[in-house]
Image: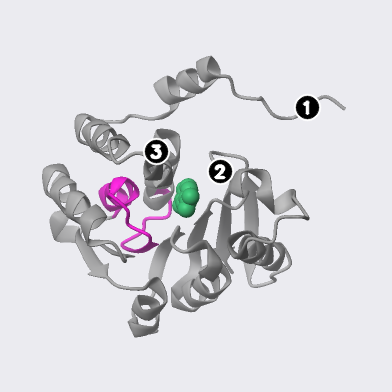
């Protein structure tokens, strides 16, 4: 059987970006500033993933969104821009330096008034959120060791028909390496195994970026 996927070269990847993501000046400058942070810039989502998130949020008419792992704010801006009128994104991160950058760009993007940024551990933030104000969309991208707990809490907080996106579900291929017992890899395998067997959701895993899973609450 022929391969059903394209192995991306840098040239094909550039083509994808040019034709698949409208990255505006604010996002471009944010990405450039984040690159200057060094190796950790790898945590920033890619432009085509940002475009995809924006589109999904719009497609489901999301008004309330949740994000675990703000970092410097790229994905939060993509999500916030896609929300319906009066919408709100609750996003959380542990790091005050990264989120200072995020706040500046939320202002520049004109979405600061629709983003509720909470500094603190994602699980604490999740457990503070009440059941009676359900979310339409949740992006899971914080501490990989806690992905199974994030998944359960997000399912609790989502309305039926609400969508979860999990980032980094392939961990650069480490999920397949039986010798890899990094707690982050173990937890990612666990959530991947759980989601595909979970009758509470419809699931699609995509080989985009570092692997993303979509789980739609039934
Ligand atoms: C890492 C975390 C991420 O969320 C990501 O998208 C890429 C890398 C990391 O911790 O290395
Ligand atoms: Mg990530």
**Residue 117, percent from left and from top:** 23, 65
Residue 132: horizontal and vertical position, in percent?
36, 84
Residue placed at 45% from the left, 72% from the top? 158
- How would you rate the neighbour count of disc 3 (Cα within 10 Å): few for under 14, some for 14-19, many for 20 or more? some
Q: Looking at the image, which is closer to me, 199 or 7?
A: 7
Q: Secondary structure at mark 3?
A: helix
* Left or right of residue 173, residue 217 in this image: left
Q: What is the C-alpha distance between the residues marked 1 and 3?
A: 26 Å
For the residue carrying disc 1, how many other residues have a C-alpha within 10 Å: few (<14), some (14-19), or many (20+)? few
User: Mark number for residue 210?
Assistant: 2
Q: In the visual, does 217 lie left or right of 105?
A: right
Q: Is residue 64 magenta?
A: yes
Contact, CB < 8 Å: mark 2 with mark 1? no
CA gap, disc 2 to disc 3? 15 Å
Q: Secondary structure at mark 1?
A: loop
Whether ligand 1 has any atom under 8 Å from the Cβ at mark 2 is answered as yes
Say whether disc 1 or disc 3 marks the residue closer to the N-terminus: 1
- Give the residue furthest to the top: 11
101 to 127, vertically: above or below: above
Please name the residue shown 49% across and 79% down the image: 156
Q: Which mark is residue 3?
A: 1
Dot 2 falls on a residue whose secondary structure is: loop
Query: Which residue is more in the foreground, 168 or 90?
Result: 168
Report the residue at 44% width, 34% height from top. Answer: 48
From which residue to which does the magenta span run? 59-83
Q: Position of residue 59 (x, y in %)?
A: 42, 49
Which image quarter: residue 4? top right
According to the picture, the residue beneath numbered tag 3 turns out to be 51
Tell us which disc is closer to us: 2 or 1. Answer: 2
Q: Is residue 112 left or right of residue 82?
A: left
Q: Residue 40 lies in magenta, yes or no?
A: no
């Amino acid at each position: 059987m022929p391969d059903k996927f394209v192995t991306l070269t840098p040239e094909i990847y550039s083509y994808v970006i040019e034709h698949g993501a409208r990255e505006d000046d604010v996002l471009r400058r944010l990405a450039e500033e984040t690159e200057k942070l060094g190796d950790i810039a790898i945590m920033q989502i890619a432009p085509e993933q940002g475009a995809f998130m924006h589109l999904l949020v719009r497609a489901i008419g999301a008004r309330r969104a949740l994000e675990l792992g703000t970092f410097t704010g790229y994905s939060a801006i993509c999500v916030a821009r896609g929300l319906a009128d009066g919408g709100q994104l609750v996003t959380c991160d542990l790091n005050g330096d990264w989120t200072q950058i995020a706040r500046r760009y939320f202002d520049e993007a004109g979405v600061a008034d629709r983003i509720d940024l909470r500094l603190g551990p994602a699980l604490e933030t999740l457990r503070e959120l009440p059941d009676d104000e359900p979310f339409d969309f949740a992006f899971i991208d914080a501490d990989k060791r806690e992905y199974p707990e994030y998944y359960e809490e997000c399912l609790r907080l989502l309305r039926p028909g609400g969508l979860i996106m999990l980032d980094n579900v392939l961990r650069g291929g480490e999920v397949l390496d039986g010798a890899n017992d990094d707690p982050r890899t173990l937890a990612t395998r666990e959530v991947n195994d759980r989601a595909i067997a979970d009758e509470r959701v419809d699931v699609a895993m995509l080989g985009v970026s570092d692997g993303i899973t979509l789980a739609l609450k039934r």
